[in-house]
Amino acid sequence: MNLNSIIQAILSPGPSVVISILIMILGLLFGMKTSKAILSGLYLGVGFIGMSMAINQLVTVVTPASKALAKNTGINLPAIDFGWTGASAITWAWTFAFAFFAIEIGVNLIMLITKTTNVVNADMWNVWGLALTGYMIYFATGSYIWAFVAGAIQAVISLKLGDMWSKEIEDMLGYPGITVPHIEAFTAILMWPVNKLMDFIPIFNHQWDAKTLKKKIGILSEPVVMGSLIGLIIGLAGRYQIANALSLAITVGAVMAIFPVMAKFFMDSLTPFGTTMSNFMKNRFKGRDFVIGLDWPVLGQSTELWVTMVILIPISIIYAAVLPGNQVLPIGGVINYCLGVGGLLLTGGNLLRMLVLGVIYEPLFLYGSSYFTNVFTKLAVNTGAVNVPKGSSVSWSSIEAPDLRFLMSKAFNGNILAWIGLVALLALFWIVYQSFKKDPIPRKKYETSSTKKPTENATVS
């Protein structure tokens, strides 16, 4: 049995099992009682499984509605959107995918030793994202060296993203010592300039989170009500019969209500684990504040996250119909986690900003997935992990960090303009990182704006 087979066997139970066992082991190493370490691991697994079931149910019910909406608008696009599940399947089947575990772990260790990150990344399942980037660069350049360099760059960026978000996640969700070192959130970097411009528009400088909206609009702000209304609108837009539209409405509302319930298991797992880990590190590493990196569903108790992603579904369908040169109908990736997670972490859960940013940046993903259609199709055909009918093509409509992957694939192939663009993008990332280092909890400024007197609000530009 080779190394690749061993790794595949370890990962085969899925992320919920792998991460749960890892949390149990880390909990014991950090000094948790055996019973508490086991409970932390099990509760984390329950949270991930419950969240996955709810997400899968949401995808199951909105996919036919999205297809109906697309059919009624006359959309006929060549590339099949197989979502992140198809993308991960073909990536894990690539011969060199396992090598990126060494890159992820090596980069993490070096950065911990050199004190350039405080993130201990436990999200090993998502190493496939590094491997996918590596294949994209190999496809463009024919060089495994550039593929591994690109994977290392992405690993560094992901860990620094984890450093950026840790204090905000603790403040917003109440998870101490937890962060999300996921390249999915890299969308926040391109969103940042537009978000800064919003600072000069008074309407955006108020709290627009679910808690604040509840005081203003009452029952309409409840997740089950918002979900039901959104589901009903999507159903009617897809010309469902009234009975089917109502069924979709109730199902989406139910799923929206389930997300916060499932997220409670994350809190029951991560609060004692994070506290124990933090105390362990502080006692042994003076001046260091280590955090554990986990996958994005730990953010699932945020109502703003789900409202944004569901509202953007019909908008993405409309974009697919009207954008010239787009080849992908968003079905498998119709729920765009990148826009939701990036917007949530950038704005601190400001729903109005998240929605506007989502509308502005959705075309980036459709064009990114259209550009990489040949890459996905070639990998799918070569590995045989996903069946691609003859003459068809596949892609992923909500591909993570399409801007970064595009620029690296072009730059490492010798394109000077792409090198300039890549350097500019990384410089912007550093500016955003420094901004969050200075002010790590963005929602605080909206709280301040919301409590000012009317005369003071009038002077805000």
Image (cartoon, rainbow, N blue to C red):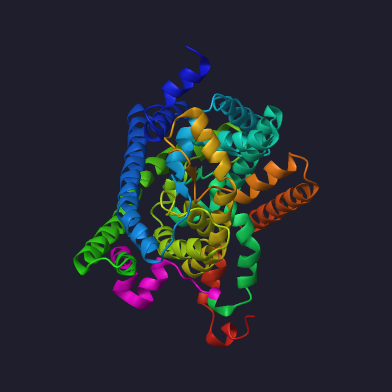
Q: Quadrant of residue 107?
A: top right
Q: Name above or below for residue 75 compared with residue 34.
A: below
Q: Is residue 225 magenta?
A: yes
Q: Is residue 337 left or right of residue 414?
A: left
Residue drawn at x 39%, y 28% as measured from the top left: 21
Q: Main SS of the magenta segment?
A: helix
Q: Which range is magenta?
A: 204-228
Q: Is residue 147 left or right of residue 315?
A: right
Q: Is residue 362 magenta?
A: no
Q: 420 or 289: nearer the eye?
A: 420
Q: Is residue 283 left or right of residue 418?
A: left
Q: 316 or 381: nearer the eye?
A: 381
Q: Position of residue 29 (x, y in %)?
A: 47, 26
User: Which residue reaches farthest left?
Assistant: 243
Residue drawn at x 29%, y 59% as measured from the top left: 252
Q: Name above or below for residue 382 compared with residue 364.
A: above
Q: 259 or 292: nearer the eye?
A: 259
Residue drawn at x 63%, y 55% as measured from the top left: 189
Q: Quadrant of residue 198?
A: bottom right
Q: Position of residue 437 (x, y in %)?
A: 65, 53
Q: Is residue 93 visible?
A: no
Q: Name above or below for residue 451 compared with residue 397.
A: below
Q: Name above or below for residue 201 compared with residue 276.
A: below
Q: Position of residue 328 (x, y in %)?
A: 49, 53
